[in-house]
Image: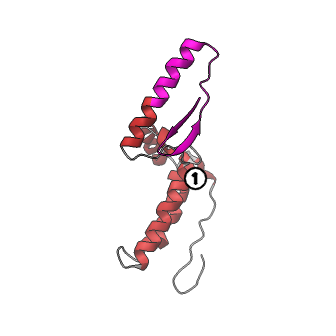
Amino acid sequence: MRYSIGGKQYKKTLGTADEDQALQRAYEIWHEQSFRNKQGISLDSHPFVEVAEEFIEKIVAEAERDERSKYHPIYWPPIIRRFPVGYFGDRPIETIATADIERYLEWRKTYWTTGPGLQVQKIRCEREDGRIF
């Protein structure tokens, strides 16, 4: 299926050879994309990691303008990269639902005891005076 919304061309597979199912699926995609366009929601898929990195850049820029604590760009990026990015990774952000967030929160509770954090031997820490631990 090919279509245009907002002056941009899109191509999607309908995932079926059956003409009736393909037509139904095409209508569903068209209506969903039209709704997203009207709501100002991006029609393109964005991996979670990409959005998280943009957020980290925003934190750094805001701290440089004194709009947030100078400690946020120091402490938040490693936490964001270790936990939410570690869990969601390259998953398209628009596919993350409430149930996925609930599963993430459960995963986070056991990260250090039975999860991936159990394998971490050391966490590198750099102090303001340049000392590394």
- Measured as percent of width and height from the top left, residue 27 is found at 47, 24
Q: Quick one: which residue is furthest to the bottom in this view? A: 129
Residue at 56% across, 43% down: 91
Residue 98 seen: no
Question: Left or right: 65 with respect to 123?
Answer: left
Q: Magenta segment range?
A: 1-30
Total marks shown come to 1
Residue 131 seen: yes
Q: Quarter of the image containing the C terminus?
A: bottom right
Q: Which residue is mark 1?
A: 117
| Magenta stretch contains residue 54 | no
Residue at 62% across, 18% down: 16
- Measured as percent of width and height from the top left, residue 43 is found at 49, 43
Element under label 1?
helix
- Measured as percent of width and height from the top left, residue 23 is found at 53, 18
Residue 3 lies in quadrant? top right
Q: Quarter of the image containing the N terminus?
A: top right
> Residue flagged by tag 1: what amino acid is it?
Gly
- Measured as percent of width and height from the top left, residue 58 is found at 45, 67
Q: Is residue 7 above or below residue 22?
A: below
Q: Is residue 122 above or below residue 114?
A: below
Question: Left or right: 95 with respect to 68?
Answer: right
Answer few, some or many: residues within 10 Å of disc 1's Cα (few below 14, many 20 plus, some between 14 and 19). Answer: some
